[in-house]
Amino acid sequence: MSQRGSAPASGKHRDVETLFARAQQYHESGLFSDAQAAYRQVLKKRPNHFDALQLLGLSEHQGGNSEAAAKTLRRALSVDPQSAEARANLATVLLTLRRPDEALTCCDDAITLNPNFANAYYTRGNALSHLKRFTLAVASFDRVIAIDPQRANAWNNRGIALQELGRFTDAIASFDRVIALRPSPKAFINRGGALQAAGQVDQAIADFDSALALEPNDEDALSNRIFSLDFIADADVAQHQAARSEWWRRIGSKIAAQHPPQPDNDRDTSRRIVLGYVSADFREHSAAFTFRPVLENHDKTQFEIICYSGTPAEDAVTESFRKQASRWRDVSEWSDDRLADSIQADKVDILIDLSGHTQGNRLRTFARKPAPVQVTAWGHGTGTGLPTIDYLLSDPVAIPAEVRALFAEQIHDLPSLVIIEPPPTELRCPEPPVMANGYMTYGCLNRISKISDAAIGVWARILQSDVTSRLLIKDKLLDDTAVRHRLLERFACHEIGPDRIDFEGSTTREGHLAAHQRVDICLDPFPQGGGVTTWEALYMGVPVVAKLGNGIAARLAGAILSAIGMTDWVATDDDEYVEIALRSSPDRLRTIRGELPNLIQRRCSPAEYTRAVEEAYRTMWQKYCGAPQSQNRAVPPIGS
């Protein structure tokens, strides 16, 4: 938000301008309440003082009262309707109020008044990004850069918009420019995120380390580093949990020390339990497919459901979650203190984290332990490192007994670490495509960032052993021709040419599911395996070859296959992986397609799975109620 100065004081207006100068001093010192009081004194003496109105609006916005700021800036525009600056400032406030359509109109009006106003183009780009009109957003940021090539925030937001468009190579180049202009932690984090999404994980971790070198307690860098370690082949559970413990040491433990838990919930073991689900993914997102079936199948007579939604942009999926909740809280703009206070006021008995260390998480709130029992599950079910979270929902294959002592949480086993809601059955094809094609088609419909060089080497062995076979790889990142070319080069290193590989980019979810009709066997990538994608393949009738690795993410597909009784599709080394992929005849694949629906229904249907989840919650609650207060888990001291 921009501001302009005032004219020099003179004559009878000197007292007003003295007050105005004092207000500006407060404002520049960050004393927003004092500044607002002084600006209002100016306006009592001169109600149409345009600069006082502008700066009062700015201070209200900076002080967290954007509703008041919008009213003040509209008043400023009534004094000077030709002010492009006031319109651009109002647009910034409207964006904070999540009114991007109105913000866009303000920006367009400002640009009409001043066609070379960089701030208006910048805010216009942000409004278009909020509206998911990313191509037009990039054009607006390009206009800012044409006016001011040194404007780092325009290069940064341009990179974010390009990443949303799947143009990762261009996005990385844009972030390169940001780092050259202003090498901040945020710039390294943004470039690291683009590199990680494009499959360049080592470089991504290097960027997160660069961010931490500049700011050792940067939470985004710590969490992004945690997430990226899942993609490193030689990283084991000990390293994964050590990285999570580092977040606790630097961030969580300090918060916990300042907010000792004070639960006063009624310890009745038989009453209706109040569950609080916390997520930024109550929306069209793959994680939502894993926990929506649980919320839909909960016994509402035994469990009250409260959803604490950090979803910034709601959609039809959001509405489906809202219908399942007894109470709905939009917490996307809430502070951690406000969220914790609401959880305590709502008398939540068991609070469930659905994000882990992924974007939009509220782990800072979980560090406060606002609920007597806290659980993490599903959205990023790999452990948080927070001793204030009591349980991690998992299964014996995903987390073997020998590594459980490394986790901050107690592991509670379910029939499967994760399930998904059943996709539309009409998208299934009863016949494997090999029956019509005469050759085997392997497929990987995971994010290509999961496809390691080691996985490519093993897949090349499979393709070389069956010279008629083909490989279908599908991911939205393949819309980027540079990403596609890099992937082909990696296969070429193993003498697999482009004539053996089919690529498919972004489609609708229905199109994504329908792509399984062209696949006989799915190949799970490693070390980072597929969760939702493994379930999607199985529901579509396509068996999956998986390999058990070191961390949870490297064991996820194997755990899912084991949960439905397909342990013979789970390898422990590369040679076994190749053998499993090559051994099935067309008739056997047809039989498997027929058997899979019953296997899933018998072992991991949403209704049966939810009953197991509810039994887990009831057991946790009974354990809490039966234990004396002194036996509740203590918060370790800072640095532990």
Image (tube, grey):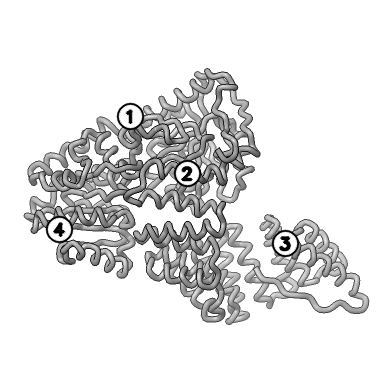
Q: Is residue 83 above or below residue 166?
A: below
Q: Nearer the viewer, residue 243 or 628?
A: 243
Residues at marks 1 and 3, CA–CA distance in whole angstroms:
54 Å
Disc 4 residue type (three-letter): Arg
Residue bearing the label numbered 4? 470
Of the image marks 2 and 4, the number of the one nearer the N terminus = 2
Q: The C terminus appears in which quarter of the rendering?
A: top right
Report the residue at 70% width, 61% height from top.
69
Residue bearing the label numbered 3? 59
Disc 3 residue type (three-letter): Ser
Report the residue at 45% width, 66% height from top.
161
Whether residue 61 is visible, yes or no, is yes
Residues at marks 3 and 2, CA–CA distance in whole angstroms:
38 Å
Q: Nearer the viewer, mark 3 or mark 2?
A: 2
Q: Classify residue 531 as left or right of residue 208.
A: left
Residue bearing the label numbered 2? 244
Disc 1 residue type (three-letter): Glu
Disc ID at residue 608:
1
Q: Is residue 320 above or below residue 348?
A: below
Report the residue at 58% width, 65% height from top.
102
Of the image marks 3 and 4, the number of the one nearer the N terminus = 3
Q: Secondary structure at mark 1?
A: helix
Residue 18 in the image: x percent, y percent? 87, 70
Q: Secondary structure at mark 2?
A: helix
Q: Residues within 10 Å of mark 1 (few under 14, many from 20)?
A: some
Residues at marks 4 and 1, CA–CA distance in whole angstroms:
38 Å
Whether residue 355 is visible, yes or no, is no
Q: Secondary structure at mark 3?
A: helix
